[in-house]
Every structure is written in structure tokens, then in C-alpha cells.
Image: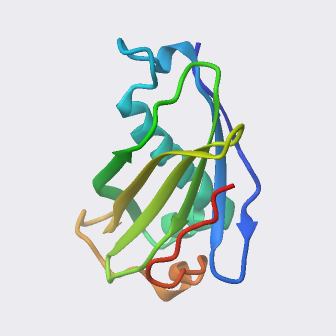
Amino acid sequence: MSDQTRPSAATHSSLVTLHEYDVVVGPASIDANGHVNNVEFVRWMQDAAVAHAEARGLTEATRQAGAMWVVRSHHVEYLQPAFAGEKIRVLTWVADFRRAFSPRRYRFVRPSDGTLLAKGETDWVFIDARTGRPRSIPDALQAMFELPPVGWEPTIS
């Protein structure tokens, strides 16, 4: 049985568009230690990022620009374990744009008790689909996301 996922509505604030992506942990996500395997968090990061990009129109705009996004790096800091049957909410937002790079941040929260389970970041690279080389992210694509101030964190409740 695979995990059940559902994109939630984006939460808008005056600072940033925070996308919520819900996951229900299935048995296949559990490792030999009895909790969610670390690789699942990376998969959920990718799934949440794609859902957010699609919700904002970025996927189609990227294709029309003759480009694609690839991952340069992932970083995850695990804080608390998660278990089978639990609902996990992945909060994600675009943190910045730097020429051809865009860091995206994630927070994994158990909504039933508000526990912060993990924090993550992915460094995405904007790639020219024809040449395979990084290229500057067009202003029109950057304008699809509101960027937070440096150091901004979502309110976890």
C-alpha cells in the first residue's frame, strides 16, 4: 500500500505563499526501526514542491520557457519520528531566487499535536532544456512566488 497524499490549499499571508501538502504514512514507509524511513521525507519534499509549482502555474511556464528544474542538493534535519497511520503536513515555500538557483524550504508537522518532525531544504537549479546548462530564472517565473524575508519561519501550531 502506498502513502495517500493530498495537496492542501495554499495558505496566504502578507509575507509568503506557504503550500501545504498532506501525507498519510502507509506501512511501506516504515523502516526496520519501526518509524518512517528517512528517504520518505526526501520523496515528500519532491512531491510537495511539484504540487506547489503546479498550483502556481510554474510547471507549464517552465515548459513554455524551454527549461526544466533539477535538484542540486537536499538537506533534511530529523527532529522526531513519525509512524504508520499518522497524518503529516508538509509545509513548503520558495525561500529565494539566485540567478539560476532557487532554495525551497520544508517543515514536516504532525497536525494532531503540532509536533515539528523535520526541517528540510532543496536547492533547485533552472536548466535550459536544449543545452542542459543552468540559466537565469526569468522574472516572470520569479513573480509567481512571494518571497519571505531572510530568516522567516512559518507558524507551527
Please say if 12 is above or below 123. below
Seen at 57% across and 66% down, the residue is 58
Report x, y in % for residue 136.
34, 82
For this rendering, which residue is in front, 137 or 88?
88
Please say if 127 is above or below 77. below
User: Image quarter for residue 138?
Assistant: bottom left
Quarter holding the C terminus? bottom right
User: Image quarter for residue 137?
Assistant: bottom left
- Relative horizontal placement of residue 155, taking residue 62 as reference (left or right): right
Seen at 36% across and 32% down, the residue is 39
Report x, y in % for residue 69.
39, 60
- Relative horizontal placement of residue 133, taking residue 22 as reference (left or right): left
Seen at 61% across and 77% down, the residue is 144
Seen at 25% across and 62% down, the residue is 132
Report x, y in % for residue 119.
43, 52
Report x, y in % for residue 98.
34, 82
Please say if 148 is above or below 3. below
Quarter holding the N terminus? top right
